[in-house]
Amino acid sequence: MYKLVINPISTPTTVDPQIARYFYNLVPSDIVSGTITIPSTSFTDDCGNAVTSNLTTISPNGGYYLLIVDSVVRQSGLFTVATTGSSVVITQAKSVPIGSPITLLVNNFAPVSTSKDYIT
């Protein structure tokens, strides 16, 4: 008769958040028909540099956007980020005063887990 013993071991997991922050102040020319459309090149980065290409987009298996308008977090259903990162569209423009600071946070995670089962 054989006896099978499985010794559980801990599974080390590392999570490396990668956060990009973009900043913008609302100008009237970005409002059309009650919708705000902000091109990626209208944003600045953490260092105050103008963004010259598309914004960072979320990872399909571990990311999310957070939009802050006038220090208030917006519901995810009230804005979209183009799949290419070329623009941000905010609905209900009338609720956002001209000159309001708008911050987009892009949070991506790349969790890595390794585990081995030992049978003795």
Image: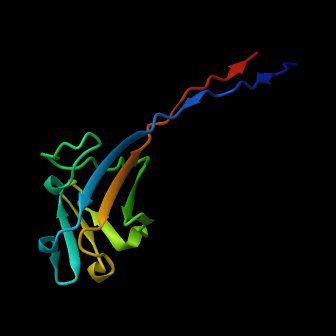
* Foreground residue among 85 and 71: 71
Where 96 falls versus 43 (above or below)? below
Where in the figure is residue 106, as x and y percent of width and height? 36, 50
Residue name at image x 25 percent, y 45 percent: 45
- Residue at 15% x, 74% y: name it: 28
Residue 29, percent from left and from top? 11, 72
- Tell me the quarter of the picture where residue 120 sits: top right
Q: Residue at x 29, y 42 (%)?
A: 46
Q: Is residue 108 above or below residue 68?
A: above
Direction from residue 21 to residue 61 in the image, left or right: right
Q: Is residue 42 left or right of residue 78?
A: left
Q: Position of residue 1 (x, y in %)?
A: 88, 19
Displayed quadrant of residue 36: bottom left
Left or right: 4 with respect to 29? right
Query: Picture quarter containing residue 72?
Result: bottom left
- Give 68 or 14, whichever is nearer the viewer: 68
Find the residue positioned furthest to the top.
120
Asked if 51 appears above or below 39 in the picture, the reply is above
Extreme residue in the front direction: 99
Residue 90's place in the image compared with 82, above or below, is below
